[in-house]
Image (tube, rainbow, N blue to C red):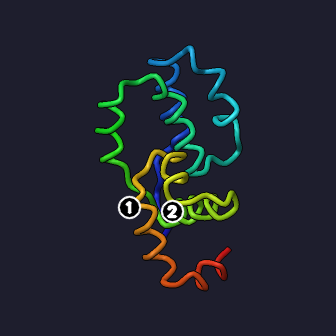
Amino acid sequence: MKIKTPDYRKIYTDMIRMKYPEKEALCSSILNKSLIEPLDIIRLNNIITESSDKKKMQDDQKLKSYDKKTILQILDYQKKNNLNNTETAKHFKLSRNSIAKWKKTFFSTDEAADKHF
């Protein structure tokens, strides 16, 4: 059975058109891709909310959740770019503790992490 996922292209296209028309040019390259990946959604969200106040961003961050595929992409990004947990957390606007927990959950040892990547 196929799992239904939200139509992020439609959601973000409508949101940009209605609330953020000035950011349409910045987001068009991502929205025009044939397949929108979870990291693309994070990028779109960062573009749209870059001017929001800090308190609102903190509140929004508490409600985010990530699937296994996205977590592994984030950890892969960290590995490819030689980033530590703090740098990765800053880049994706996450908690350092989340990154550490994901690494511990998905890779019980450093050897297992190296085999994955």
Residue at (56%, 66%) from the top-left corner? 72
Q: Position of residue 30 (x, y in %)?
A: 66, 37
**Foreground label between 2 and 1:** 1
Task: Name the secondary structure under disc 2.
Answer: helix
User: Tag on residue 11?
Assistant: none
For label 2, the crowd category at 10 Å Cα-Cα, with few meaning under 14, some 14 to 19 and many 20 or more, is some
Characterize the local packing of mark 1: few (<14), some (14-19) or many (20 or more) Cα atoms within 10 angstroms: few
Q: Which residue has dot 2 on it?
A: 71
Considering depth in this image, is 82 or 92 the residue closer to the camera? 82
User: Picture coordinates of residue 106 (x, y %)?
Assistant: 49, 76
Query: Any mark on residue 97, and which?
Result: 1
Q: Position of residue 101 (x, y in %)?
A: 40, 69
In what element is the residue under mark 1? helix
**Which residue is at a point 57% across and 40% down the rendered structure image?**
43
**Is 6 placed left or right of 27 in the picture?**
left
* Image x and y of residue 91, in percent: 54, 46
Upstream in the sequence, badge 2 or badge 1? 2
The tally of labels here is: 2
* Residue type, label 1: Asn
Badge 2 amino acid: Ile
- Looking at the image, residue 94 lies above or below residue 116: above
Horizontal side of residue 10 vs 57, given as left or right: right
